[in-house]
Amino acid sequence: MHSSHLEAIDIDSSFCRTYGVKYRCVFDALASFSVFESMPPDVMHDILEGFCVINVQLVLRTLIRSGRLTVGVFNQRLDMFVFAECDTTSKPPHLPEDFGARGRLIGSASQNWCLFRNLPFLVGDCIKDSANESFPNFWQLHLLAREICKIIFAPAICPPWLLDLQQLIIEHHTLLAATNKDLFTPKMHFLIHYPRLMAVYGPLRHLWCMRYESSHQYYKKVAKVCNNYKNIALTLAERHQFKACWHMSSTNALPAEISISGKQSTLSIAALPRQLQLLLGVTLGLKCSHSVLSVQSVHVQCVYVCVRELYIIDIDLIDESPVFMRVTHIIEHDGTWIVCGILSTAQEYSEFTDSYVISSSEDYVVVSVNELKTYKPLVSVEINGKIHTCLPYRLLH
């Protein structure tokens, strides 16, 4: 089809507006390149700066225009909300005062993702209507969007999920067309191709531009400081090379696989709770006379572990509910990093907030860092005395 579009454009250039193709890609001259097979989509721009933004704007604009919420109240909730440890550097900014009229978010991709995931906890009490058991259309769209994002952002996928994704996108776009068809943009259209593209490329989060956009921050700061725009490309290239030479001249030029942040100390096994002492003795052969390194947080390769945070350690094969652990201790013994914590289970699933209500037991559990199912802490919020947590993506069994 793309080839036929190019042939038509070669004959009559007015077909550019019909097919949305301006001219033949110069990379098509390469033997190993195909314009429709070698260019994976970017979920950062399509989803975090498109699909998610439109969804959040619809929810907030509907609540504000209906009088259930005000810009000032929402901004106060943002200030009072306790974000997870992994979200502290991506807190969304305040809504502008004219958001009700213009309805545009001003955050970055990471801030949009943080707001999208925490939205049910921020505005959930403004949506429920005791007289109507069903969810309003704008909230059904948000719940469908969350299920779509869970599959798209999964670090590992299985083929049946792609059929689920295709059906969820159909339901979402059908409902959006009935609710407000003016919200459709090209990025919303790109979404219908994602099941096919994920079958070709695999998990798309491994191909996104987030890390490249992050590296741009250095160049933006340099450009602002140097204030020299006669040959800005040369200036940035030279400064980048100077920085690279400075880093490579260091004795620890390559980043370490293990990075400890925060407080660290030597801890005696005898100082740990009795049940945890017995568990460490059975699993690792540690005795009360042994001492270990204890830290508050650590990066082990790509996994970030922090005490007092919630992680998933397993998936129940019967009801497919996750099994959680609240980290209490992070210790290192003979080069092995061990995560200790309290076992927590899912009591129920709340469809309205797309979250699990969890309860903590008195049992300790000990796992290695590689056994954690999530590589970052989960969002956990207390609502009416109950702890709620939501999953950032789907997990394989």
Image (cartoon, grey):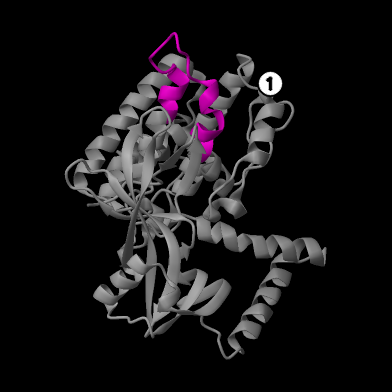
Q: Residue at the spot x=38%, y=38% of the render?
A: 357
Image location of residue 245, percent across then percent down:
63, 84
Q: Which residues are magenta?
A: 118-142
Image location of residue 110, percent across then percent down:
55, 49
Based on the displayed image, in which of its 4 quarters is residue 63 positioned? top right
Image location of residue 157, percent across then percent down:
27, 51
Quarter of the picture holding the N terminus: top left
| Mark 1, other Cα within 10 Å: few <14 / some 14–19 / many ≥20 | few
Residue labelled with disc 1: 101
Image location of residue 32, percent across then percent down:
31, 63
In this picture, residue 50 sits left or right of residue 250? left
Looking at the image, which residue sits at the far left? 318
Look at label 1 and name its amino acid: Ala
Q: Which structural element holds mark 1?
A: helix
Is-magenta flag for residue 376? no
Query: From the viewer's perspective, is residue 229 above or below residue 15?
Result: below
Q: Residue at the spot x=33%, y=82% of the render?
A: 287
